[in-house]
Image (cartoon, rainbow, N blue to C red):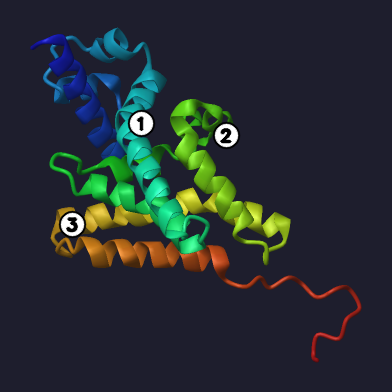
Amino acid sequence: MPIDDSRAALLDAGERLIAERGVDVPLRDIATAAGQRNNSAVHYYFDSRTGLIEAIVERRMNWLEERRMQLLAAHEDDGTAHEVRTLVAMLAAPMLELVGTDGVTHYGRFLEVVRAHPVIADARRLAGADRAAVRIIAARLDAALPQLPARRRRQRLETMATVMFALIADYERALESGVRTASPDADTAEIIDMIVAMLTVPTREPAPAGRDRSR
């Protein structure tokens, strides 16, 4: 098997097995699923488990970044590039487009599993030029929610990725099991609406001490 094909097979197998069995799935199982006779194939191509996870993320992120930049440009032109629903859509819709691509069947579930891994969670990674679209969208979302206290706004924005990954992962599972038939526009709109609702629901801040709560 050519080197590029072997690497791609390991990425596919890693994405699927981590999604199905968790981040600690044995690397030898990934190598076997990729058709590699050498159990150390993952170390050969990616140095480590973290290297494999990073490569899986990067393989998808390049396309997602380009798509989000296209959407940012389009919404700058139509004047909606700072609206909460539009900003959420620019994060979620490209991921759902990707799930609808031939052969991409486990990426949402993979992200759900690795969401706390430094490859995903380390905020310093947003500083890179390859994350410019996500960084712009995140900053605009923060500015688009002035009605929330700063602490609540930060908490909701930090939770948003977890919610988004979970919703997309559930969508993948439903498609795979046949529980639902793909309806891209309706499914995308529903997922975006749920994320927007989570971000914008009014807060229930506790009443100050000594205040009569019965009034």
Identity of the residue drawn at 81% across and 85% down: 213
Q: Residue furthest bottom?
A: 215
Residue 164 in sight in this render: no
Amino acid on which the number 3 mark rests in the picture: Leu
Q: Quadrant of the C terminus?
A: bottom right
Identity of the residue drawn at 30% across and 24% down: 26
Badge 2, how many Cα within 10 Å: few under 14, some, many 20+?
A: few
- Secondary structure at badge 3 equals helix
**Residue 19 vertical position relative to residue 143 in the rendered view, above or below:** above
Instruction: Pick whichever, 191 or 175, lies toward us.
Output: 191
Badge 1, how many Cα within 10 Å: few under 14, some, many 20+?
A: some
Direction from residue 58 to residue 97 in the image, left or right: left
Q: Position of residue 183 (x, y in %)?
A: 18, 64
In space, the residues marked 2 and 1 are separated at their CA atoms by 15 Å
Residue that badge 2 annotates: 123
Residue that badge 1 annotates: 57
Identity of the residue drawn at 61% across and 53% down: 142
Amino acid on which the number 2 mark rests in the picture: Ala
Residue that badge 3 annotates: 175
Q: Position of residue 28 (x, y in %)?
A: 24, 19
Identity of the residue drawn at 38% across and 44% down: 68
Q: Residue furthest front?
A: 77
- Secondary structure at badge 2 equals helix
